[in-house]
Image: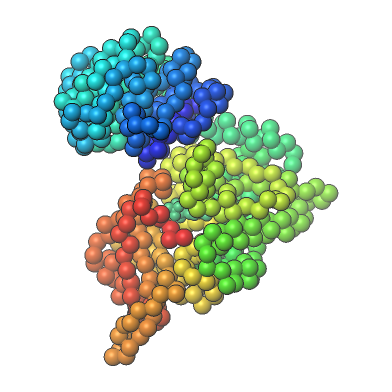
Amino acid sequence: PVLVVDFGAQYAQLIARRVREANVYSELVPHSMPVEEMLAKKPSAIILSGGPASVYEPGAPTIDKSIFTAGVPVLGICYGFQVMAHELGGDVDKAALGEYGKTEAVVDDATGILDSSPSLQTTWMSHGVAVNKAPAGFEVTAHTEGAPVAAMEDPSRKLYGVQWHPEVKHTPLGQDLIENFLHDCAGIEADWNARNIIDEQVAAIREKVGDARVICGLSGGVDSAVAAALVHRAIGDQLTCVFVDHGLLRKGEAEQVKHDFVAATGIKLIAVDASKDFLDALKGVSDPETKRKIIGEKFIRTFEKAQRQVIEEAGAQGKEVKFLVQGTLYPDVVESGGGDGASNIKSHHNVGGLPDDIKFELIEPLRSLFKDEVRAIGTELGLPDEIVWRQPFPGPGLGIRIIGEITKERLDLLRDADAIAREELSKAGLDRDIWQCPVVLLADVHSVGVQGDERTYGSPIVLRPVSSEDAMTADWSRVPYDVLATISTRITNECRQINRVVLDCTSKPPATIEWE
Ligand code: XMP
């Protein structure tokens, strides 16, 4: 893989994506990972990300110098570039002129990572520290007013650095720079694509599974559907899907999933109604992490219980189910604190919410992928658009969209409000513009209203439409006012306990997409 070393900015994630857009596989690692461990991953190249610190301050994050002599091509970006310059003996200090935002760079030598660049490039900068003098052995290939060394290279050691951010779209030629580094400077082939991922995974799954029986927890979402289709391609009828109705689904969802999925794939499906079990276990619980853990555990227990039925229906008596397929994605892993060194933002039900004594071995063929990559694989596997382009819906369902305790009445109320919002957004043709639109019930909050000349004291509904590329970052969607107005009027008219509809206009970060 190409390792993207995270120096603590949100840019690292973005760099990893851009590398994959260049059809090269990438992984994020924290800067605190020892260099030997990085090298043990046999990286084809290493990219050092930007970060908020200043290299000359005591305690600033850095990386052991040996990384630069390991023979692996290295690209330093922004802070990572300064670390490289500093560690190798260049002069790095407070910039005479800080540069933030759009900045013109003068390209002195259009070579290496700047191959084919025009002599002036528009770039996106964010630095108050500058490299004043490159380390010995480096050629300076670009400069700006505030950065005497804005790009540098030493092709003999395969070391490259750039002060600006090639990974952001505000640097129009940024992707070219990244591709120059990967393909030309580091000599890495562009062979990471949907078809190759499928071939690789199919082979790996066959080898792992042998002739064992496998079940897949199907939620109806894109991820589990693609995971199921992929495993089905590998092992055919050894796979049975189990769809669990946990009582936290949206209106009409169970029927729709059962019908669409079977119609599209022909994969065996068993539906289990476990709603009473889930709701009993969740009684009295309002803490989000506790909800997630309970739901994660209940899923597993339900799959364990479904085992016998799976075996019987498959006519595989005497066998047991050895593997459980889950549609876990890379962001689930990173945000659950499972990425190397990542902190736990929330325990995605299928990662941090799993019980310790789980009896199945897991198969998670999408564990290193982003959502858009999963969609490409789904399409390549022949799944229809209705499945591939479904908006994401979290496994814990409406359970994490009721702020407060989950009860049947609250669920029914939220289901009605959610159905109205979904219907109106679809009618307005916004399904593809909006990544997803959680509808959230603030069940414990009450506010005063007036309906039919009478005072009401009801709960608010929050609309949370967001646009995003991969759910790691998101912006709130600018849904037209008249669409919002229709949704608001309909919800307050048709859901009597709701007397207020509010719009969540916060990006991620600082908020997450879901409220819990
Ligand atoms: P957040 O709320 O973390 O959500 O910004 C990012 C994306 O993940 C979905 N999500 C989940 N999906 N199990 C899932 O399968 C979970 O526990 C879970 N939590 C959040 C969320 O809907 C969004 O698309």
Q: Determine which quarter of the picture holds residue 119.
A: top left
Q: Is residue 166 placed above or below 339 in the rendered structure? A: above
Of the pair 325 and 171, the residue shown nearer to us: 171
Question: Residue at point 36% right, 11% down?
Answer: 155
Question: Residue at point 44% right, 74% down?
Answer: 444
Question: Residue at point 17% right, 30% down?
Answer: 97
Can you give x and y, in whole percent of width and height, for residue 466 in the image?
35, 55
Can you give x and y, in whole percent of width and height, for residue 272 in the image?
65, 63
Q: Is residue 511 left or right of residue 355?
A: left
Can you give x and y, in whole percent of width and height, for residue 318 in the image?
83, 49
Number of numbered labels in the structure image: 0
Residue that sits furthest to the bottom in the current view:
453
Q: Is residue 374 visible?
A: no
Q: How is the image coloured?
A: rainbow
Q: Determine which quarter of the picture holds residue 285.
A: bottom right
Can you give x and y, in whole percent of width and height, for residue 459 in the image?
39, 76
Q: Is residue 320 visible?
A: yes
Q: Is residue 385 left or right of residue 284?
A: left
Q: Is residue 346 left or right of residue 500?
A: right
Of the pair 297 and 7, the residue shown nearer to us: 7
Question: Residue at point 31% right, 86% down?
Answer: 451
Of the pair 67 and 189, the residue shown nearer to us: 67
Q: Is residue 78 left or right of residue 371?
A: left
Of the pair 68 and 437, the residue shown nearer to us: 68
Q: Is residue 357 placed above or below 149 in the rendered structure? A: below
Residue that sits furthest to the right in the current view:
318
